[in-house]
Image (cartoon, rainbow, N blue to C red):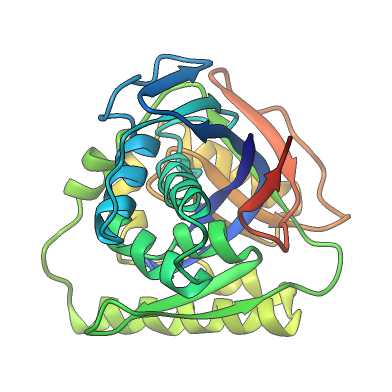
Amino acid sequence: MIKIKTPATSANLGAGFDCMGLALDIYNEIWIKPSDRLIVETDDDLPKDHTNLVVSSMFKTYKYLGQEFSGAHIKQINNIPKTSGLGSSAACVVGGVTAANVLLGNLMSRQDVLDFCAMIDGHPDNVAPAILGGITASVINGQNKVHTFRCLPNGNIKIALAIANFKLPTTKSRNILPKKYSREDLTYSLSRAVSTFAALSLGQFEKLKYIMDDKIHTPYRRPLIANYDQIVKAFEDAGALGVYISGAGPAIAAFVDQNFRPFTPPKEWRLEIRNIVSQGVIVEMNS
């Protein structure tokens, strides 16, 4: 039996909309073995047919490689909260594509897997760190090839997460965004995106508090998240280095160091402190 562990991811990192993300030490697990029919076991209410995102990602991989998918015995253990802004969908895509690739004898390289997962997910901000680990900034060229820059921050830096007990569908969070932006707003956000990756790469964490706001998605998603202003202020008062909406929300994340003082969030929220992990998806072969 094959065990696949895929990490949660926190995307955007402020102004790095749809292109930046990092991997966290929360994992979804897939246990899988060949079968002549589809059997899906889950620990929650996920679909148990071809509409399951792990299964559909496997099916797409088989088709892409010119192979017929007859079935598999799959057991899913889901530790990443769904529709929370922590990359649960990307974890399913990466897990499914990786599972199919392993069952077919690793016909795809890691770069091939990254390119294909980004095509399925629509952007590389979550799938890149889920596959490569660390903190990533990615671009996609005209041939659907993903080019990724990766760093591991120096020093004892972690991610504090305010995780909501309510859900915010990604479609709602994405549909609220405008179709057009002013040149001033784009310049504002682009300058902060490149500065954020530079600060993280160089270990200049003290600059994060000045450069992690943006005008591409945060102003529009902020009203969708209950207690947003209260939680951001609590993070800042507790010594967070930089605060941002994780992915499409509602999770709110912050870079923190040893000086951070954990706080009690409002009702319907919980606070967790997580590590940034250097390794992405993990494959273990079990007898």
Where is 32 relative to 106, above or below? above
Left or right: 142 in relation to 157: left
Left or right: 189 in relation to 49: right
Q: Between residues 239 and 122, which one lies in front from this camera angle?
A: 122
Quadrant of the rendered structure where residue 272 is? top right
Quadrant of the rendered structure where residue 72 is? top left
Left or right: 201 in relation to 57: right
Q: Residue 18: image x %, image y %?
A: 36, 64
Q: Between residues 178 and 30, which one lies in front from this camera angle?
A: 30
Q: Is residue 268 visible?
A: yes
Q: Quadrant of the C terminus?
A: top right
Q: Between residues 62 and 83, which one lies in front from this camera angle?
A: 62
Q: Quadrant of the N terminus?
A: top right
- Which residue is painted at 49% across and 83% down in the image? 194
Where is 109 relative to 281, above or below? below
Q: Is residue 15 visible?
A: no
Q: Residue 99: image x %, image y %?
A: 49, 46
